[in-house]
Amino acid sequence: MNKNKAIGIFDSGIGGVTVLKEILKLLPNEDYIYYSDSINNPYGDKSDEEIKIICEHIVNEFIKQECKAIVIACNTASAKAAQYLRETYKHIPFIAIEPAYKMVYDYAYYEPTLVMATKGTIESEKFNLLYHTYDNHKTILLPCVGLADIIEEGNQDKLKIYLEEHLNAYRGKVKNVVLGCTHYPLIQNEIQEVLGQVHFFNGAPYLAKHLQEVLEENNLVNIEHTKKEIQFIDSSNDEQKKKRFFEIIKE
């Protein structure tokens, strides 16, 4: 594997930009190809088999580009397809996001916790294994159906109505919020406006660290390259998504 090749990152939309931003802090000299699969968004309402087929198509696109590693920056895809992809494409490392629920166990075990995630993630076998292993018995699982779509759309009025409707009941009752979808860190401020002062747990920084470790173990870190290139691909060719993606990268 050539260390000068790009790292592929994919999500069902632009939410995975929150993962890429964390990766850039640790691996600033790499080239990246980001695939926003908005034509198939949301993944949460699809069967496991459909998600595997969708992910396999994206992975094959990355392989054509000779990517040296692939990041699954979507919790639903990670939960339902990561194991299959690793078994199918053994020659390439896959690094998969997962909800940061174990962090609650490690750092805030006694505090009431709200897990916000897609329905697909919360119902997945992978998440349920994680949850039951580290359950602090003070946790509420909240499937946020449609929230990623609203974030993707960028409609602030619709977002405010959604959050008030779904989160008001937990105001003052939870101390921790696990952001179980890569879109959700984009709206931390809006979530806090409804819930009050809470501590957010987000898996992206830990994925970034794991990616760095995997590249180092395989001698794939690009140390000398000084000008990184970020290529953005959207499956529905949505120019607005591309514009918003690069705006968020620069924030």
Image (cartoon, rainbow, N blue to C red):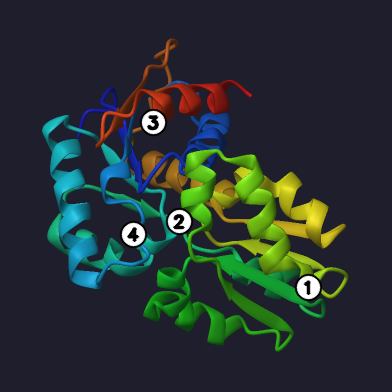
Residue drawn where x is 67% and y is 68% of the image: 166
N-term-proximal mark, 3 vs 4: 4
Write down the residue under mark 4.
43
Q: Amino acid at mark 3?
A: Val
C-alpha span from label 3 to label 4: 31 Å
Please report whichever mark, 1 or 2, sits nearer to the chain's N-terminal start. 2
Q: Residue at x 43, y 10 (%)?
A: 227
Dot placed on the residue nearer the N-terminal end, 1 or 3: 1
Query: Quick one: SS at disc 3?
Result: loop
Q: Nearer the viewer, residue 19 or 44?
A: 44
Discs 3, 2 touching: Cβ within 8 Å:
no
Q: As displayed, is residue 108 above or below residue 26?
A: below
**Sooner in the amino-acid sequence: mark 2 or mark 4:** 4
Residues tagged 1 and 4 counted as in contact (Cβ below 8 A):
no
Q: Which residue is mark 3?
A: 221
Residue 170, label in figure: 1
Q: Residue furthest top?
A: 227
Mark closer to the observer (1, 3): 1
Determine the secondary structure under disc 1. Answer: helix
Disc 2 marks which residue? 97
Distance between mark 1 and mark 4 Cα atoms: 26 Å
Quadrant location of residue 242?
Answer: top left
Say what amino acid the circle numbered 1 marks. Answer: Tyr
* Labels 3 and 4 touching (C-beta < 8 A): no
| Residue depicted at 83% across the width and 68% down the height | 171
Q: Sequence order check: which comes first, mark 1 or mark 4? A: 4
Mark nearest the camera among 2 and 4 is 4
Q: Secondary structure at mark 4?
A: loop
Instruction: Point out the frontmost of discs 3 and 2.
Output: 2
User: Mark 3 or mark 2, which has the lower sequence index?
Assistant: 2
Mark 2 element type: loop
